[in-house]
Image (spheres, rainbow, N blue to C red):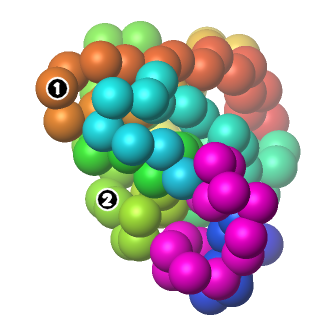
Amino acid sequence: MLLAAGCLAVRADDGAAGHNGLPAGVPYASDTDPVRITAVNFSPSEPKRGDTVTAEVTCSSNAAAVTVAVGTIRVLVPKKAPGIFRTQLHVPAFAFYSSHQTVIITAIRTDGATAQRTISVDIR
């Protein structure tokens, strides 16, 4: 199950926890630091055709947006908290797509700088 805890993160430049109010796992980053994707989680971990998949992407605090692309389909993942992006996606029940998919996750900073992570998903 994908859950974002309401705990506080450690600010990367001072080592002290609790004063910047970031969710757990979200590293502090200034507007000029590189944007980073630190974790990608989805449930169920072995999706089947017709399933609804819950996905969460954790990024550095300077991520303004996250997109997920599968083939030619790209969706914007809603921001739930600084550095936390979460969505639910429906896997088509029909075999329009191959059972093996490459998913490209892109984190975007306000000035357009990006970071990408690619994962492979097998649909049962």
User: In the rendered image, which quarter contains the C terminus?
Assistant: top right
Give the secondary structure at mark 1.
loop
In the rendered image, the quadrant that contains the N terminus is: bottom right
Is residue 42 in the magenta section? Answer: no
Up-down: is 31 above or below 43?
above
To which residue does mark 2 refer?
78
Left or right of residue 95: residue 41: right
Query: Where is residue 67 drawn, in percent x and y?
Result: 35, 34
What is the three-letter code of the residue carrying label 2?
Answer: Pro
Which of discs 1 and 2 lies nearer the camera? The answer is 1
Specify which label sits upstream in the sequence, 1 or 2.
Answer: 2
Q: Residue at x 19, y 35 (%)?
A: 110
Q: Is residue 7 left or right of residue 109?
A: right
Q: Nearer the viewer, residue 78 or 73?
A: 78
Give x and y (percent) for residue 55: 58, 54
* Residue that protrudes farthest toward the bottom in the picture: 6
Q: Is residue 83 left or right of residue 52?
A: left
Tell me the CA gap for discs 1 and 2.
18 Å
Residue 60 sits above or below residue 98 on the image: below
> For the magenta stretch, what is the residue range?
11-26
Q: Residue at x 68, y 57 (%)?
A: 14
Contact between labelled residues 2 and 1, with CB atoms less than 8 Å apart: no
- SS assignment at label 2: loop
Q: Main secondary structure of the magenta part?
A: loop
Residue at the limit of the structure toward the left, as seen here: 111
Task: Indicate the position of residue 118 as horizontal and vertical percent values.
Answer: 63, 17
Give the residue pinned by disc 1. 111
Vertical placement of 24 versus 52: above or below?
below
Q: Residue 102's image quarter?
A: top right
Does residue 76 show up? yes
Q: Residues within 10 Å of mark 1 (few under 14, many from 20)?
A: few
Quarter occupied by residue 101: top right
